[in-house]
């Protein structure tokens, strides 16, 4: 072997060796956080069906559900109890189990339960709420039946898509109601929080998330106490701090240098409150990235943005409530009914964007792509069985129906979606509520259609 060839092989071997040792694997996960999930008397009355004598929340969340489901992990603050009847709103909340069932169906994976209303129905409320969430396989934390229950489940360990998270949850108080023995409601106590965060660090998860019920109601800027407690959490290893309780929006700050993020308050996700600033909230998207190199994993914040949502209350003897994500319904004059609703939505949009544009840091609004770039639709294949079904089916009418005629065929197209994940969730919704099984997601650019092969991530 010549010296030249030998040196070439050595160099080639060194290249492959260097490539092998420096090769890395990158994975990402999307987290979606929402604010306060409440049920005032008006919400509970709206969910009651006088014909079936049962409660049904499907119409409340039907428009926001595809957004919730499109995240890998969706987490919210359950600010009420599931204590059974009599059902009641403020000041001592107990919501129908049907609410929890619909939250699960709509896409919630985890709920936090430590808040100032945790003890509204005393021991029964604490324990029955835990039992209902367990029966629905919704992970939860913040309240516990006893010390043994807390010791075995806290901090809550969440595993999803190869990521592991430690979730902690605390509240400033319980409206003066003493904690019923042997129950535990996590209260904001700096000594306890430091101890719990040390336990969370020992879990060696990819990120520690702290959900705090804190601050001053109806104030749009965080208090000194909020900032102090947040600083403690970050010093002790938290990567994300998510706040609730003020019932209005407060700023979201992503500190890229320290790789941490705080949302002081995400407002109301659903409630009966109608005054200005309180009739909506924000949904916070956080994308984490994990790089695995040489058997060592490092997780960091990769992206963060928010989208607004607004709660419509219709008129009538029994008003109806509907949660609308701005990204798809801000300019809708068909579903956002009446000038009063449209004006209220516009005011909420103006107020929220003014606050966030001034006080947010590195967390912009998540906007809907332009119509002329790329859309997805659901193409239904078996036309003979579907012609009469389409026009009558509420689910299909909700997503929108198009009949596309070409020289050689006629096709039914359902919906126009601006993200693949939303189209996928809509297809699952259609298939679960109709007899339709033969459907494909297609990508539409002008008149071009391409059938998409199912995959876990969004297509390029």
Image (spheres, rainbow, N blue to C red):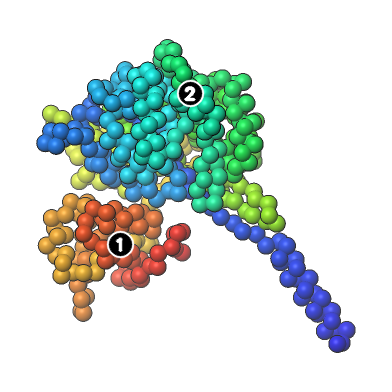
Label number found at residue 169? none
Kindly indicate the quadrant of the structure image that contains residue 349.
Answer: top left
Q: Is residue 263 left or right of residue 84?
A: right
Q: Is residue 56 left or right of residue 12?
A: left
- Residue 389 in the image: above or below residue 237: below
- Residue 365 in the image: above or below residue 23: above
Look at 86% across and 87% down and name the residue there. 1
Label number found at residue 377? 1
The residue singled out by tag 2 in the image is 146
- Residue 178 in the image: above or below residue 339: above
Expressed as whole percent of the image width and height from the top left, the position of residue 445 reads 35, 67
Expressed as whole percent of the image width and height from the top left, the position of residue 124 reads 35, 21
Q: Residue furthest front?
A: 148
Q: Residues within 10 Å of mark 2 (few under 14, many from 20)?
A: some
Instruction: Answer whether residue 315 is visible to the viewer in this image.
Output: no
Q: How crowded is mark 1: few (under 14 residues within 10 Å), some or many (20 or more)?
A: many
Secondary structure under tag 2 reads loop
Residue closer to the observer: 370 or 449:
449
Distance from disc 1 to disc 2, alpha carbons, whole Å, reads 50 Å
Look at 64% across and 36% down and name the residue there. 202
State the count of labels. Answer: 2
Look at 62% across and 32% down and name the residue there. 199
Q: Which of marks 1 and 2 is nearer the N terminus?
A: 2
Choose mark 1 or mark 2, whichever is in front.
Answer: 2
Q: In this view, does 199 lie to the left or right of 263?
A: right
């Amino acid at each position: 072997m010549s010296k030249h060839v030998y040196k070439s092989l050595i160099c080639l071997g060194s290249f492959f060796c260097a490539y092998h040792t420096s090769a890395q694997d990158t994975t990402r996960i999307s987290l979606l956080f929402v604010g306060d999930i409440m049920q005032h008397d008006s919400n509970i009355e709206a969910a009651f069906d006088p014909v079936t004598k049962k409660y049904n929340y499907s119409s409340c969340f039907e428009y926001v559900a595809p957004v919730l489901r499109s995240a890998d992990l969706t987490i919210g603050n359950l600010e009420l109890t599931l204590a059974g009847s009599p059902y009641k709103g403020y000041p001592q909340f107990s919501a129908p189990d049907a609410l929890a069932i619909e939250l699960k169906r709509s896409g919630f994976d985890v709920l936090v339960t430590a808040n100032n209303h945790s003890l509204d129905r005393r021991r029964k409320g604490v324990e029955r709420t835990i039992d209902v969430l367990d029966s629905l396989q919704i992970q939860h934390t913040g309240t516990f039946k006893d010390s043994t229950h807390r010791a075995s489940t806290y901090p809550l360990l969440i595993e999803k898509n190869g990521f592991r998270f430690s979730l902690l949850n605390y509240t400033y108080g319980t409206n003066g109601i003493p904690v019923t023995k042997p129950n535990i409601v996590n209260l904001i106590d700096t000594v306890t929080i430091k101890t719990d965060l040390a336990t969370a660090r020992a879990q060696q998860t990819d990120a520690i998330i702290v959900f705090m019920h804190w601050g001053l109601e109806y104030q749009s800027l965080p208090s000194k106490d909020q900032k102090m407690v947040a600083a403690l959490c970050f010093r002790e290893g938290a990567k994300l701090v998510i706040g609730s309780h003020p019932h209005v929006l407060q700023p979201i700050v992503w500190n890229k240098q320290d790789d941490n993020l705080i949302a002081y308050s995400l407002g109301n996700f659903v409630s009966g409150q109608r005054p200005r600033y309180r009739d909506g909230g924000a949904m916070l998207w956080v994308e984490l990235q994990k790089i695995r190199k040489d058997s060592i994993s490092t997780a960091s914040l990769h992206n963060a943005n928010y989208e607004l949502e607004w709660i419509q209350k219709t008129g009538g003897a029994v008003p109806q409530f509907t949660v609308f994500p701005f990204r798809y319904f801000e300019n809708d004059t068909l579903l956002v009914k009446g000038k009063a609703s449209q004006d209220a939505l516009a005011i909420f949009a103006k107020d929220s964007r003014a606050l966030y544009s001034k006080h947010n840091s590195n967390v912009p609004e998540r906007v809907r792509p332009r119509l002329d770039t790329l859309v997805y639709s659901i193409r239904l294949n078996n036309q003979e069985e579907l012609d009469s079904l389409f026009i009558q089916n509420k689910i299909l009418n909700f997503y929108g129906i198009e009949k596309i005629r070409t020289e050689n065929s006629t096709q039914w197209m359902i919906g126009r979606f601006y993200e693949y994940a939303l189209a996928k969730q809509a297809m699952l919704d259609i298939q679960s509520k109709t007899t339709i099984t033969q459907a494909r997601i297609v990508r539409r650019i002008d008149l071009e259609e391409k059938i998409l092969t199912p995959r876990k991530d969004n297509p390029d």
